[in-house]
Amino acid sequence: MPQVVIAALYHFVPLPDFEDLQAPLRASCVDAGVMGTLLLAPEGINGTLAGSRAGIDTVLTRLRADPRFRALDEKRSYADDNPFPRLRIKLKREIVTLGVDGVDPRDQVGEYVEPEAWNRLLENPEVLVIDTRNDYEVKLGTFRNAVSPETETFREFPDYVERTLKGQEDRPIAMFCTGGIRCEKATSYLQGQGFKQVYHLHGGILKYLETVPKEQSLWDGECYVFDERVSVNHDLQPGSAVQCEACGEPLSLAEQASADFEADVSCPHCIAELTPPRRAVLEMRRDQKRQANG
C-alpha cells in the first residue's frame, strides 16, 4: 500500500487576512512533514499537499479548526513517493486565475452533477460538454463527446465564450476540470453572461475516477496533474506521461516514441527551437542528474 497521501483541496471563502495565514500554515505543514503547493487569495484557498496520512490529517484538521475552512473540498490519491520536492505557499490575487472582476462562485454557480450521474450528460446529444482545462492537459485524456476550448491558459476562457458560445444561452452546457475549482468560476462566469442551464462535475475528473468503475467509465486516457507524477490513470496511480525537461510540455506515450524525444533534452514541441548551445547545457544537466542518482 503506497505510503504517501496526496490531497487536492480548495474552498472559496472571503479571506481579508489571507496574507496573515501564510506563516502559520507554512509552520503547520513543516511540523507535519507535508510538501506541496497552496495558493492563498482574498477569495479562498487552493492547492495540493502530500505527506504521510498522519501528516495530511494533522494539517487539514488544523485548517478546518478555522470555521471558514470547515467546508473545505478535498480529494485524495496515493503514491509510493512524494510528488513534490518542496513546500510552497503563495499569495495570489485569485486562487484560479480567470482575470475577470466580479466573478464569484459564492454569489452564483452552476448546478453540481455527482460523478454517478455525469455519464447521462455525456450521452445526451442536446448537452454541450466542455473541458475547461488547458490544451496541454486535454491532450493526455478527456471525456468522450467533450469539446476542448483549445486554450493555453484559463484567462482565455472568456474569449472562447464570446467567440463560440454566444447565441447558445438556452442550450444545456456541462463543464468539467481536474478537481472542480476551475468550473466553479467557469459556471459562475457563464451564468453572469446569461446562460441559463449550466452544470459542472462535482469534484472534477479526480472524483469521477475515484467513484465510477472502469467498466462504466466514459473517460479516455490519463488525467494531467500539477506535480511530478505528471498524470494519473483511472486507478489514480501515476500514469505513463512524462514532462519534457526542456520546455515543460507533458508528453503522451506516442510523443515519447517520437524520434524528436530525447529524455531531458528535447521533445516534438521544442526540437525546432533547440540550438546547439542549448542542447549542450541540457545534456550536461542530464548527465549531472544521472550521476547524482547513481
Image (spheres, helix red, strand yellow):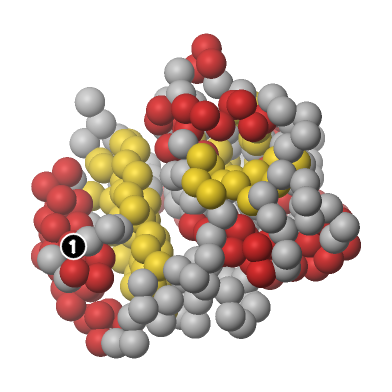
Look at label 1 and name its amino acid: Arg
Instruction: Please state if 103 lies on the left or on the right of 158 as rendered.
Output: left
Of the 4 image quadrants, the one containing the C terminus is: top left
Q: Nearer the viewer, residue 90 or 106?
A: 106
**In the picture, residue 67 is in which quadrant?**
bottom left
Q: Is residue 178 visible?
A: no
Q: Position of residue 46 (x, y in %)?
A: 40, 64
Image position of 59 with respect to 256: above or below: below
Q: Where is residue 243? Give x, y as percent.
A: 59, 47
Q: Residue at x 71, y 44 (%)?
A: 172
Q: Which residue is mark 1?
A: 64
Classify 262 as above or below 86. above
Q: Quadrant of the N terminus?
A: top left
Query: Residue at position x 18%, y 62% from top?
Result: 64
Q: Residue at x 49, y 51 (%)?
A: 180
Within the image, what quadrant is residue 293 found in?
top left
Q: Going by the image, does 35 lie left or right of 171?
A: left
CA neighbours of label 1 inside 10 A, class few (<14), some (14 to 19), many (20+): few
